[in-house]
Image: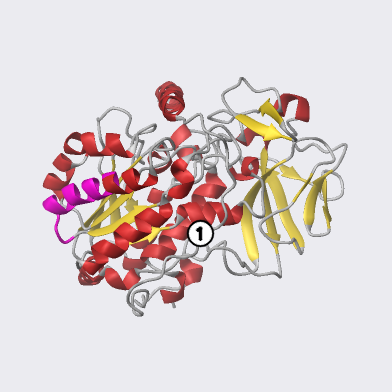
Amino acid sequence: MKRFIKALTILVIIVMAIGAVSCAPDLPGQIVSTIEPAEATDDMTGHRPFDFKAEDLTWELQNVFSGDHVKNETVMFIDKGDTKELLYKIDKVISVTSYNGKKTYEEGRDYEVVDGKLRVTEDSKIPCITSKKYYSGDGTLRIDVDGETRSIHWGEGTVMTNYQVNVEYTHSDTWNGYKQKCFAGIYEKLYNKFEAGEDVTIVFYGDSCTYGAASSFAYGYPPFQYSYALLVTNALADIFGYTVHHEKSKLSGTGPVPKKDYVAGDRGTITYINNSVGGWTTSDGVSNFDDYVKPFIEKSGCDLFVVDLGGNDGGLPPERTAENDKAIIDKARELAPDAGIIIMSTLLNRPGSNWAGNDALQEPYLVKLSEELRAEGVPCAVCGITSMTASVLEHIKFEDFSGNNINHPNDFWARLYANTLFETLVGYENLN
């Protein structure tokens, strides 16, 4: 079994890397400012109280964008003596551990807090990549540094995370960046079924990020944290006392699922379907729908359809991406007319690099699409991952929370994804 997992992991990494590279636009990089939050058309859109306490969520779903405690925020030091800013100004460090959680580093010897930032000491045992290695990439990822184009380090698997550490800390300042709008109120049919104990089906359809890249679970190494899609689905099971059954797929390129059902209760079953494929564009999503989605909805139905394509559309006009998403949504609604819809705007391919393109411009078109669908009575909202990413990048460096330094989230970024989707669908403010 270990050999199988290792072989599968290697195959997945190769497929996604080839798919992603083939879709990468060779466009000038651009830094993107935070997009304003999409406003709901109905003042009651976000109101839907649930009989569940926020503190009873698993730690992975604890809201990083509120409170005074962050667990396992990741940071990557380039050289000994490097100092990094985190999402918040540090009051007190609780722990600094290796990415896999197996090593603990000592304050004063391995790191210190300087003006609320984290500094790695000169004789630290914390792994640092060194500037020489970081700026000696293979040419795949290029950025402009002081007017000079430089090739920088990237890679799948543990290539980045070997140099990232987890930081648990407390803080006094509050989040003043992008705040996702909650749309729980528009998903009335979904929640009525949950409250009645009826079985529900959630379908995720996307590219590598929804597949799970570069979550440690998908790649088969510690700490084996789930992707955002699994984290949020499990949270719904926790709230309503359900069991999550993972529909396994034999389709080429689709992501792994846990071997066992997730059991939080026996009130009902969530059927989890995730036939996302790394490297796919929205055009791929349209052309492959009948093979990758239709048979599964015909078999199990669909109560919530989450589409997350666009990260590989960097060379496509953003309005075309929205048109393709609309075509996918129309196909899903033909099969499941009562399904709720969530459109995930894409993360940003590394800003300022040869990978940055029109992915940064898609979100307003997706917001407009969702508003048009809501006006037609379709329960549809946008989960603003683009805005969230841009806002987070005002505080921390891309290499601190990326799984490949180009376009995949590491475990911490996957939790930010999960936080943002959870706020869109459920709303932390709706928990007791």
Task: State which quarter of the image contains the C terminus.
Answer: bottom left
- From this view, report whether residue 397 is shown above or below residue 174: above
Task: Choose between 17 and 273: the one closer to the eye.
Answer: 17
Instruction: Give the residue type that dot 1 points to.
Output: Ile
Please indicate, yes or no, whether residue 281 appears anywhere in the rendered image.
yes
Which stretch appears magenta? 324-338
At label 1, counting other C-alpha atoms closer than 10 Å, the crowd grade (few under 14, some 14-19, many 20 or more) is some
Q: Residue at x 33, y 62 (%)?
A: 381
Tell me, yes or no, if residue 234 can be seen here. no
Residue picked out by circle 1? 35
- Image-based side of 329 in relation to 395, left or right: left
Q: Nearer the viewer, residue 251 or 31?
A: 31
Q: Secondary structure at mark 1?
A: loop
**Residue 83 pos. (x, y %):** 80, 46
Q: Is residue 221 left or right of residue 139?
A: left
Q: Quadrant of residue 201?
A: bottom left
In front of the other: 205 or 141: 141
The spot of residue 153 in percent (x, y) is: 64, 28
Q: Position of residue 194 (x, y in %)?
A: 25, 67
Q: Would you say residue 406 sits in the magenta stretch?
A: no
Query: Residue at 25% of width from left, 30% of height from top?
Result: 251
Question: Which residue corresponds to the image point at 37% horizontal and 74% vertical from the top-left?
Answer: 46
Residue 228, how many percent across, how many down?
43, 50
Placement of 150 over or under 343, stated as above or below: above
